[in-house]
Image: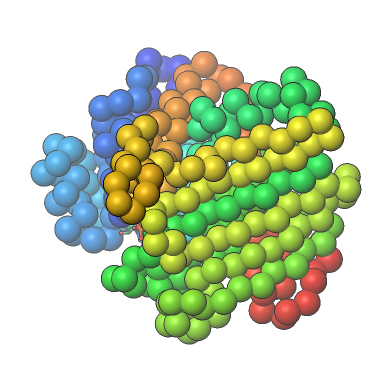
Amino acid sequence: MSSSGMRSPTLRVGIVGLGRLGRRHAENLMTRVAGATLVAACSPLPAELEWARDTLALPHLYSDYAALLAHEGLDAVFLVTPTSLHPQQIIQALQAGKHVFCEKPLSLDLKDCLRVSAEAARHPQLKLMIGFVRRFDASYRDAYNKIQQGAIGSPFMVYSQTCDQYDPDGFFVKFAATSGGIFLDCSVHDIDLARWLLGNPQAVRVYASGTRAMHRDLQQFQDVDNGVAICEFDNGSIATFYASRTTRHGHDTMTEITGTAGRLTVGANPRSNRVEIADIHGVRNECLPSFFERFEEAFLIEVSSFVDAIRHDKKLDLTLVDATEATRIGIALRESLLSRQSVLL
Ligand code: NAI
């Protein structure tokens, strides 16, 4: 019984994808997540499997996803694979009776989101969560709780940005081949946050624009390295998003929520710690280099919450409806960027 999580007190997990983020999840699952143990990994790249063998001492390594799913006694899979693979891999895992954690976004295609939802509905005993990690960050959670308690009155506007540090090696250009573009890859976090913080409204109209300030090669994927967007919701609230791949000072994620009685800001200064340097250049602090340092603790809490939900059969706060809405809005932003028109949803 790999589905209920009750036969074994410890959840036996297989990870799929050992790239930039997969390795981090693998390390967390191996050593830092109570109630789970990493028993197998899958990657098509021999070098990644070698890393898992040498660094994690993982004995069960697969180059084929179906073989990993057939691994005896596996309870859950973690999909940290290119986004274009998510829907089919989720469906295969559900059909194999596994709980599924899948990295964001759920899909780049709305029909695929609905296919996944239909399959999930056929397996109500299995948990499926899409990793919108910011919901598990202590500061975002505090902001959410404060809004629930009425601290800023009725929230009506969100500004949210995800700005990655400039990478001269061209990672973002290669990544754009499967990421779905800057809005579906980066702003999808801000979209999910905005809906969560504004009380889950439905998007009704979006407008997006962007530029290729430094990564000109993104043109081949019709992508941009800096994008801005406005999203109007059915309850009258609005959100603006900014995503960048060219930030020079570091990774800069921040969100501002304005309400009828005040404003909350999360992450206004992307400082790496509390050290401030004062010298002939002025007063400054160093910045976090990447999303991982910013959300390191949140990634752990996110995975622990998922594991806990399976082991104690708890309801997940993050639903497939949320993940589908994030994709729906992300697709509309991309459509608007390409058409230069506002898009009605
Ligand atoms: P990556 O390109 O570094 O890694 C992708 C991994 O998938 C590699 O290990 C690759 O070998 C593996 N892979 C490719 N094809 C496969 C197949 N057919 N079967 C099994 N494995 C396969 O990408 P990265 O940055 O790790 O992103 C992976 C996912 O995580 C994406 O969906 C991305 O959106 C998401 N992500 C989420 C973040 C967050 O803040 N929550 C941050 C970064 C990425």
Above/below status of 279 relative to 152 = below
Side of 70 relative to 152 (left or right): left
Residue found 73% across the figure and 79% down from its top: 340
Q: Position of residue 126 (x, y in %)?
A: 55, 32
Q: How is this picture coloured?
A: rainbow
Residue at the location (65% across, 57% down)? Answer: 241
Quarter of the C terminus within the rendering: bottom right
Residue 130 or 161: which is nearer the viewer? 161
Q: From the viewer's perspective, is residue 264 above or below residue 5?
A: below
Q: Is residue 18 visible?
A: yes
Q: Is residue 68 visible?
A: no
Front residue of 158 and 175: 158
Which quadrant of the figure shows ligand 1?
A: bottom left
The image shows residue 334 at horizontal and vertical percentages of 65, 70
- Please tell me which residue lies in front, 144 or 325: 144
Q: Residue furthest left?
A: 54
**Which is more toward the observer, 55 or 239?**
239
Q: Residue at x 70, y 40 (%)?
A: 257
Residue at the image point whose x is 49% and y is 57% from the top: 163
Q: Is residue 261 above or below residue 170?
A: above
**x and y, in percent, of residue 103 in the image:** 48, 47
Count of numbered circles in the view:
0
Which quarter of the image is occupied by the N terminus? top left
